Image (cartoon, rainbow, N blue to C red):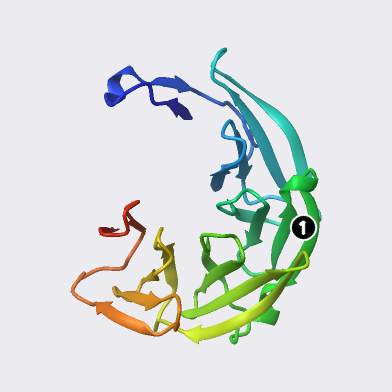
Amino acid sequence: TVWFIKDASFDKSVKVYIPDCCGSDKLATDLSWNPTSLNQMAVVSNSSEISLLLINEITLTASKLRTLSLGSKTKVNSCLYDPLGNWLLAATKSEKIYLFNVKEDHRLVHSLNVNDISPNTNDVVYSIAWNNNGSHIFVGFKSGHLVILKVRDEMLEVSTKIKAHTSSITGIKIDPWGRYFVTGSSDGNCYIWSLKSLCCEKIIQDLDSAVVALDVCHLGKILGVC
């Protein structure tokens, strides 16, 4: 379901319902808006396909632009455009991470095996995030490891590996001003890291439950955790 926000009152917003956006037998597991084409989004459904949808504000309808198909046994369950709209990242839980060049009609340019980048064997991807200029990708794993990938010449390469948490990293958020990033975990802790030094500067431990999601306001002053 897509909502068009007309003004400050959500009551006046208009809803566009997209039936079977990934097929009648599939459950949408993630979506991401293309920042350079605001009416276009990518949707994944734990399958081998990534659906690119176009939302029409005038007719209040949605149509499928195209489908990006991967191997028949692939199950992509997360996707994320970088903030500049140059790249689309897609990931399975424990097999591969894919990089698409958005400017070249979403051409698949590179893929990495999850087992090749995580220090733990049979690890599982739990969270992903881009930095603000789309040059690096932060990947949080079930093992508690954080791996930072660098995009160079249409390829992904490992930049840094950190044992960030004692349990799975369930959320990663980058400060809009590029000063720090935050990781949350099922161990009930939030860590605030310096983007420059990659050192942990603050630990929030009094949450009393696992972290499910987190976000930082557009001014970089307020952290929300649930």
Residue at (22, 77) in percent of width and height? 205
Quarter of the view holding residue 177: bottom left
Q: Is residue 23 visible?
A: no
Query: Residue 126 versus residue 47: which sits nearer the camera?
Result: 126
Whole-percent x and y of residue 108? Answer: 79, 55
131 over 102 or under it: above or below: below
Question: Which quarter of the picture shows residue 94?
Answer: bottom right
Name the amino acid type tagged 1: Lys
* Residues packed near mark 1 inside 10 Å, few (<14), some (14 to 19) or many (20 plus): few
| Residue 68 appears in the picture as rendered | yes
Say if 63 sits above or below 223 in the image: above
- At mark 1, the secondary structure is loop
Q: Residue at x 48, y 30 (%)?
A: 1
Image quadrant for the C terminus?
bottom left
Is 158 on the left or on the right of 108, as rendered?
left
Q: Residue at x 40, y 81 (%)?
A: 165
Q: Position of residue 7 (x, y in %)?
A: 32, 23
Answer with left or right where residue 226 lies relative to residue 197.
left
Instruction: Work out which residue is located at the far top of the displayed protein and give it.
Output: 59
In this rendering, position of residue 225 left or right of residue 110? left
Q: Which residue is mark 1?
A: 73
Tell me where residue 38 appears, x and y as whole percent: 56, 34
Q: Nearer the viewer, residue 152 or 28?
A: 152
Eyeballing the image, is 85 above or below 165?
above
